[in-house]
Image (cartoon, helix red, strand yellow):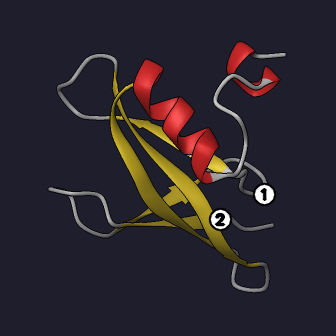
Amino acid sequence: MGHWVYTFSGCPGIGNYQQIANEGEPGDVVGRARPGGLGVVDGFVLESVDDLMMVAHFRWVATGDSSTVMPTVLEALGLPPTSDAMRGE
């Protein structure tokens, strides 16, 4: 079994890039710590998946600390920002 390639697009100041993922199949959300910025994350949501080529395309949603990014990402997925996912349940 190979590794997934995650492609990320739309993040201001960073542009489009790719990353090899060691995880199994991609989830709906990727949060990324920004280099040099403790606690600052970018939030991406899954846009499309190519199972045959093992490529997952994510689009940027928000930048900031996790208290502001995750509610925005969940809203982009159509979930309420106070859902059980936010509380880790």
Are the two marked residues, 1 and 2, in contact with CB atoms closer than 8 angstroms?
yes
Q: Position of residue 25 (x, y in %)?
A: 78, 57
Find numbered disc 1 in the image and state the secondary structure of the residue it sits on. Answer: loop
- Determine whether 82 is above or below 57 in the image: above
Which residue does the image show at 34% across and 17% down from the upper left? Answer: 39
Identify residue type, mark 2.
Trp
Q: Position of residue 48 (x, y in %)?
A: 66, 75
- Determine whether 63 is above or below 24 in the image: above
| Horizontal side of residue 75 vs 32, given as left or right | right
Q: Position of residue 13 (x, y in %)?
A: 14, 56
Identify residue type, mark 1.
Glu
Find numbered disc 2 in the image and state the secondary structure of the residue it sits on. Answer: strand
- Determine whether 16 is above or below 52 in the image: above
Q: In the rendered image, which quarter is residue 54 located in?
A: bottom right
Measure how far apart labels 1 and 2 are at the Cα level. 7 Å
Q: Quadrant of the N terminus?
A: bottom right
Q: Quadrant of the C terminus?
A: top right
Q: Nearer the viewer, residue 75 or 24?
A: 75
What residue is pinned by disc 1?
25
Q: Nearer the viewer, residue 30 or 71?
A: 71
Which residue does the image show at 63% across and 40% down from the upper left? Answer: 74
What residue is pinned by disc 2?
4
Q: Position of residue 53 (x, y in %)?
A: 69, 84
